[in-house]
Image (cartoon, grey):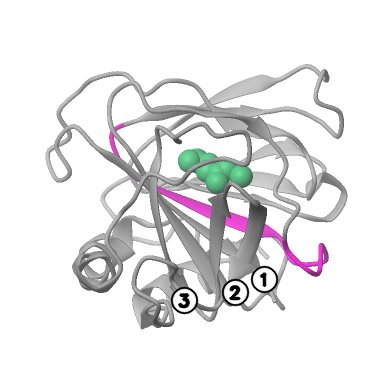
Amino acid sequence: MITDLFDDRSPQQQSLERMGDGAFLLRGLAIPFESDLLRDLANVVAEAPFRHMITPGGFTMSVAMTNCGEAGWITDRTGYRYDRIDPDSGRPWPAMPASFQMVALHASAEAGYPDFVPDACLVNRYEPGARLSLHQDRNERDFANPIVSVSLGLPAIFQFGGPGRADPVKRYPLRHGDVAVWGGPSRLYFHGVPALKDGDHPVLGATRINLTFRGAL
Ligand code: SIN
Ligand code: FE2
């Protein structure tokens, strides 16, 4: 399972940290994929620009989002759901780039989910002050699939709780290249990201990008 975490592909130390049952933090795992991911992200965003979606309660999300893959996660006044069509363009979401698939497959295998094949990738863009309140990822069809979450750019705090909204929450710093994977018993655990602190990342400036891979359909 943990085969090549300590190989020499990357200058940044890689390691595996356990966050809970079936939940792991793979530090630095995305570093070897970094330049391919950022190049392919630019193409995705050119086709499907970031937008601030509206929650069913009428609030504008501070995190800007887009998607790639067979389906995309969206929210509007009618609810949360996956849709094969980008509502802003009326066209299908951009295809999931090979580099995205590769980092997701590599991370899920390292975390003990060798059969995961993502069909959707939600791309989150945080600017200073942007936050994602505690929530569960529960719009996917099959909870046998884990969530794979890749962090790029400015560091953030990842809050990882339990099955209940009021369960105690642990805080993990997520840095450029870190990948969080949660599935199995922790698949529906509450998680969130408090307001992003200002900063200047050498590659992404005052931005954090999070790629969240799901088995949605
Ligand atoms: C999410 O829960 O969709 C995003 C988590 C993150 O930004 O790290
Ligand atoms: Fe989430």
Compared with 65, 82 (above or below) is below
**10 Å crowding of disc 1: few (<14), some (14-19), many (20+):** many
- SS of the residue under disc 2: loop
State the image quarter where residue 82 is shown: bottom right
Rendered residue at 45%/46% (across/down): 53
Amino acid type assigned to the residue bearing label 2 in the image: Pro
Whether the residues at callouts 3 and 2 have beta carbons within 8 Å, the answer is yes
- Residue 202: x and y, percent? 12, 38
- Foreground residue, 188 or 178? 188
Amino acid type assigned to the residue bearing label 3 in the image: Gln
Query: Residue 101's mark?
Result: 3
Q: CA distance from mark 1 to mark 2?
A: 5 Å
Query: Residue 215's mark?
Result: 1
Is the residue marked 2 within 8 Å of ligand 1, measured from its CB? no
Rendered residue at 65%/45% (across/down): 24
- SS of the residue under disc 3: helix
User: In this figure, which residue is indicated by the disc labeled 2?
Assistant: 118
Rendered residue at 53%/81% (across/down): 70
Amino acid type assigned to the residue bearing label 1 in the image: Gly
Magenta span includes 151: yes
The stretch in magenta equals: 140-154
Compared with 129, 7 (above or below) is below
